[in-house]
Image (cartoon, rainbow, N blue to C red):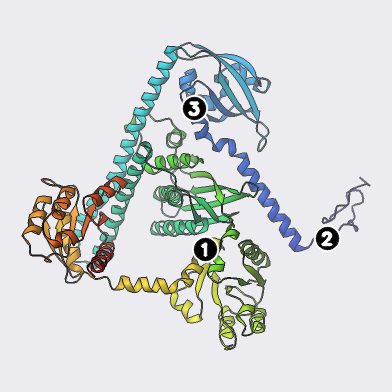
Amino acid sequence: MDNLEKRPGFSGINPASGQSDEHTVQMSPEEIELLIRENERLKQELRIRDNDILSHDQVFDSIVSGTLHLILVMSVRTYSAEFVTSNIENALGLQREDVMEDVRRIGNTFENIEQYNGREEIFIHRTNGARRHYLICVIHLPYGRSDRVAVVLLCRSDTTRGDLEEMMLQQTQDANRAAGYFLASMSHDFRVPINSISGFVLLLMKNAENPAKVMEYAHRIGISGQEILTTVDQILDMSRIETGETAIEVEEFGLGLMLEEVSSIISSLAKARDQRYMFTAAGIEHDIVLGDRARIMEMLRGILSNAVKFTPPGGRVELSVTGVPDESEGTVALVFEVRDTGIGMERKQLDLYFHHSVPSDTESVPGRGTGIWLTRKLVSMMGGSITAQSSPGEGTIIWIRLRLKMVNSGVSDFWRERGIRRMLIVNNNLQEAARIRNLMESAGVDAMSISSGYGTIKMIEQSGTIKEAGYDLILLDEELQDMEWREVIASLSAMPWVHLPMIFLMSSRQIRDEERRGAGVSQVLQKPFYVSALHRLVEQVCEKKADDSDMEEEDQVSMAGMRFLAAEDNAINADMLRELLEMSGARCEIAGNGRAALAMFSSSRPGYYDAILMDLQMPVMDGYAAAEAIRALDREDAKRIPVVAMTGATYEDDVNKSFEAGMNAHITKPIDIRLLGAQIHRLKQEEKEEMA
């Protein structure tokens, strides 16, 4: 003990003498903070690696699907399993839940499983008595608990014809049960919002004289309608995935921006149900990645929406995202954790939603939604995994694990092309300022940081009138200690000889545009800092003129005085469309089918109609045939008049087919009147240019 090692950077009491160790070097607060952060990063990385085996349960299931091989993860101390591939019943006639409770039900071999690495054993099928030889391989997991091992059972028996028939029959039955459950879930997902709509329509009729109630009920009907559309989109996505028509897109996107967008939507949903929504993120500073942004966002929205739906008022829903970058491979391992304090699920329900097994009695299980089924498919297509933990009355935790390719923003010319060469970061949090500075320097921007408002004023003042010596962007934190942020901007604005750069305010609160513009702030960057968020705001500011031009063009979109011919066989949809157009100042004449639309257009004088809105699925003559017949008429306006397809079909083939029939645009039902106006304006402009 007297030879206790004196390690630099640590201090404490010498156990031998009980006195303070005078030779120990004290660590600075900054060094301690860095040590703590590094320790947290390593702990998080270990947690992710610790769950790697368990997180790939779907991968393991797919590997052994259609075989008699088995994979499980178990404790050599309690003999309970944390994971067993779902083909255990087919291979050995055992229920998965029973094996997970006690793996010794497979055989006594598992009492001394650590001794069976690479050894062969015989297990007997519980139902048909088949003797099957298995080669047992034991893998000691390097992370987490020391008593946990993974066991791989490789079947060495010749598969008989009876075994093959048994497996094929089992797979067919599983597929049929899965289809039955999917249809039951789909029915549930439709019935709930439809019942809500029916109920609120009755309330709307009874309270027609109360404007406040009318607005409230109309809003709730709109929400229910959106739920139905979401379910329809999910079903279409599932159909496309099953038929192989859906491919995962790979595009560059900002992970932080996407998470902010998701959080904004879910926060509103949670607030409407009197719930708390919390979002945290760590390890995703380099948040510009390659992946399918729309699909990842769809997955998170689906899981979080379910969490809100099944959490009672006063409850809590949390989203935490953790990333562990791998610089050598240029990837980041992401863990999306969704946690709620909702009604929770029994173990059998949990297995139903997150494993391949499905119940034989679909009527006994209430539909929880097609969203989880779709999420599982999408996660699998992206090479990731999804796992869950739940207890009745205590809530549910869902983990989605993905690995995405990081984009080296330093190779991009984005900042240079938009004139961002030098940047000043004003933040009294030195570690946060250093983090932002390092991120921007890796992106090719010359970044400097300062901790005070007064120092900022002096630095800008010294830069003088030479633009090349100044800064192109100031990132000003709202929480300065020596000065109020408005004073800093006011002082900078009072220097007429200084070229004032763009000023972005970093804030954790929502700031109104009036307050921002009045203070001279170009944009507000919400905390925490993401490169992608800054990327987006710089793009918005630098292209503001183009954006303003687009806005002016949108403001000019008007359908006042226009006359439409609408082919729509559904009377309710036709009345709604007519009223929407008339509210926009246009006139609308309805044709009940394609043949009637053709007759009405043929008998009208040239130029009488400004545009044709064409439903695709109609009796007598559908929209495709009607559009082709109109284009074939021997009159000049038949070739030029805009024809817009109206349909609920969103398949690419449907869109292409409508264009081949001579239509100019494709609008998805329910009709968004603003989108329709923009499309009509675009088509009329193109018509004018062709005539000129």
Please provide percent x and percent y for residue 338.
49, 48
Q: Which residue is mark 3?
A: 97
The answer to whether one can see residue 280 in this image is yes
Q: Which mark is residue 26?
A: 2
Residue tagged by mark 1? 533
Q: Secondary structure at mark 3?
A: helix
Image label count: 3
- Distance from Cα at disc 2 to Cα at disc 1: 39 Å
Q: Which mark is residue 553?
A: none
Counting other residues with Cα less than 10 Å from the Cα at mark 1, is it few (<14), some (14-19), or many (20 or more)? Answer: many
Q: Quadrant of the N terminus?
A: top right
Quarter occupied by residue 443? bottom right
Judging depth in this view, the residue of 577 and 676 nearest the camera is: 676
Q: Secondary structure at mark 2?
A: loop
Pointer 2 and pointer 1: residues touching (CB < 8 Å)?
Answer: no
Q: Residue 467 location in percent, x, y?
A: 60, 80
Residue lying at 14% horizontally and 62% vertically, measured from the top left:
636
